[in-house]
C-alpha cells in the first residue's frame, strides 16, 4: 500500500464551533512528523492539506456527531491520509499535476510505522491542551497562502484578495477591495498568475 491512512476517534471538550482547531492541530502534527522523519520541507494549505513542492501530499478531515443540547460533539472522527509513495501506476491523470507523495519511489523500511506513531504523538501533544492553541504559530509559519493572491470559494460566491494572515482561530484573513474578510471555512486557490 502506498499511503498511511488512519482515523482517530475523539471526544473533544470544546464547542463544535471550534472543531476546526482539531484539524489545524493535526495539520501541524503531520507536518512536524514528516519533517522530523524525512527532512523534507512541507507547507500547509489552509485549512487541511499538507503540501510538498506545491503539491498535495496529505489531506485531513474531521467529522463529528453534534449534541444539540451542549453544542459540543459527542464524538469526532479525525481522518488522515498521507501519500507515502506514488500509486503503482502513478496518480490518476486528473490529479497528477496536483498530487504528490513523500517519496518518489520506495520509502525506507519502517517509515510508515514511525510516521504513524509520531503523527499520533504530536497530535495528542496538541490535543490535550487544544484550547491553548499552541500549534497556531507553527500553522501560520508554515502557511503557503500568506501574501498570495487567492480566490476564496464559499458556496456559489468567489471572493478575490490577498491573504494577509491566519488568525488565532485559524481563520483566513483576506484583504479585499472592500476591506478585510475573515473566513472560517471554504476553499482558497492561488490565482493562476501567482506562484
Image (tube, rainbow, N blue to C red):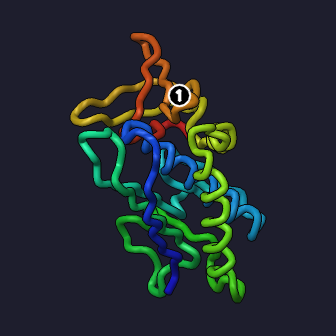
Q: Is residue 192 visible?
A: no
Q: Is residue 119 above or below residue 12?
A: below
| Quadrant of image for the C terminus | top right
- Where does the image place residue 134, in percent across and percent down from the top left? 67, 41
**Residue beneath the point at 46% across and 46% down:** 13
Nearest the eye: 190 or 169: 169
- Where does the image place residue 102, in percent across and percent down from the top left? 62, 70
Direction front: furthest residue: 69
Q: Is residue 78 above or below residue 181?
A: below
Is 160 left, or right, of 71 in this rendering? right
Mark 1 closeness class: few <14, some 14–19, many ≥20 residues within 10 Å: many
Q: Is residue 145 above or below residue 31?
A: above
Is 160 left, or right, of 38 in this rendering? left
Nearest the eye: 47 or 189: 47
Q: Which residue is mark 1?
A: 163
**Residue beneath the point at 53% across and 72% down:** 83
Q: Quadrant of residue 76?
A: bottom left
**Residue beneath the point at 45% across and 36% down:** 191
- Where does the image place residue 26, in percent across and percent down from the top left? 56, 55
Q: Is residue 102 visible?
A: yes
Q: Quadrant of residue 57?
A: bottom right
Secondary element type, mark 1 = strand
- Where does the image place residue 174, in percent across and percent down from the top left? 48, 24
Amino acid at each position: 500500500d502506498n499511503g498511511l491512512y488512519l482515523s482517530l476517534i475523539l471526544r473533544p471538550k470544546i464547542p463544535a464551533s471550534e472543531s476546526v482547531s482539531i484539524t489545524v492541530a493535526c495539520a501541524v502534527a503531520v507536518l512536524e512528523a514528516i519533517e522530523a522523519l524525512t527532512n523534507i520541507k512541507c507547507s500547509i494549505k489552509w485549512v487541511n492539506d499538507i503540501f510538498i513542492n506545491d503539491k498535495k501530499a496529505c489531506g485531513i478531515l474531521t467529522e463529528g456527531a453534534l449534541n444539540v443540547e451542549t453544542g459540543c460533539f459527542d464524538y469526532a472522527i479525525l481522518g488522515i491520509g498521507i501519500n507515502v509513495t506514488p500509486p503503482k501506476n502513478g496518480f490518476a491523470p486528473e490529479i497528477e499535476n496536483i498530487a504528490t507523495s513523500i517519496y518518489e519511489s520506495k520509502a525506507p523500511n519502517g517509515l510508515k510505522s514511525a510516521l504513524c506513531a509520531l503523527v499520533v504523538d504530536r497530535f495528542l501533544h496538541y490535543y490535550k491542551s487544544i484550547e491553548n492553541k499552541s500549534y497556531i504559530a507553527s500553522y501560520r509559519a508554515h502557511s503557503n497562502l500568506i501574501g498570495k493572491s487567492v480566490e476564496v470559494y464559499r458556496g456559489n460566491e468567489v471572493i478575490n484578495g490577498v491573504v494577509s494572515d491566519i488568525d488565532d482561530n485559524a481563520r483566513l484573513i483576506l484583504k479585499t477591495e472592500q476591506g478585510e474578510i475573515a473566513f472560517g471555512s471554504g476553499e482558497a486557490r492561488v490565482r493562476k498568475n501567482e506562484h
